[in-house]
Amino acid sequence: MPEVHFLPDDKRIQVRPGTTLLDAGRKAHVNIRTRCGGKAACLMCKVKAGGGGGLAAATRNEELKLGSLLADGFRLACQACVIGNVTVNVPEDPLKAAVRAQLMRQREEEW
């Protein structure tokens, strides 16, 4: 069975071929943001997949929604299906990033 490696969480999970990255992330307890429930409508589940052919070809929905981002390795986790081993980089949630940045600023001010 193919293995999906999620970064930066460094979590790995084996899934059946044809499983979407979104479903694999849920099984691995990796938070991939989505608002549309996996219908390729919100574009919140963008992830960056490593090369190596571990994902099926982009769907028409992905081509329409992502355009040139596909060439940079971005995929929609709700549409991209696993067919082999793949490494996926999940972007940090913007709210978590803002909180982390604020905490870092506070720590710097304390010193």
Image (cartoon, rainbow, N blue to C red):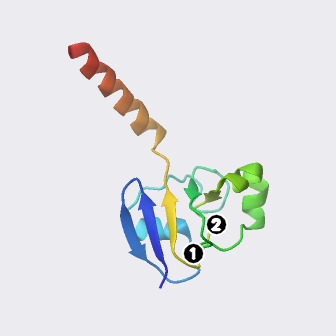
Side (left or right) of 52 relative to 110 = right
- Rendered position, 108 above or below 16: above
* Residue for badge 1: 82
Residue 111, image x and y in percent?
20, 15
Residue depicted at x 66% and y 59%: 40
Image quadrant in which you'd find residue 92:
top left
Image quadrant in which you'd find residue 47:
bottom right
Q: Looking at the image, is mark 1 or mark 2 nearer the viewer? A: 1
Q: Amino acid at mark 2?
A: Gln
SS of the residue at dot 1?
loop
Residue 32, image x and y in percent?
48, 56
Residue depicted at x 37% and y 56%: 9
- Rendered position, 50 above or below 111: below
Side (left or right) of 31 relative to 82 = left
Residue 28 in view:
no
Q: Amino acid at mark 1?
A: Val
Side (left or right) of 1 relative to 75 = left
Residue 42 in view:
yes
SS of the residue at dot 2?
loop
Residue depicted at x 39% and y 38%: 96
* Residue for badge 2: 79
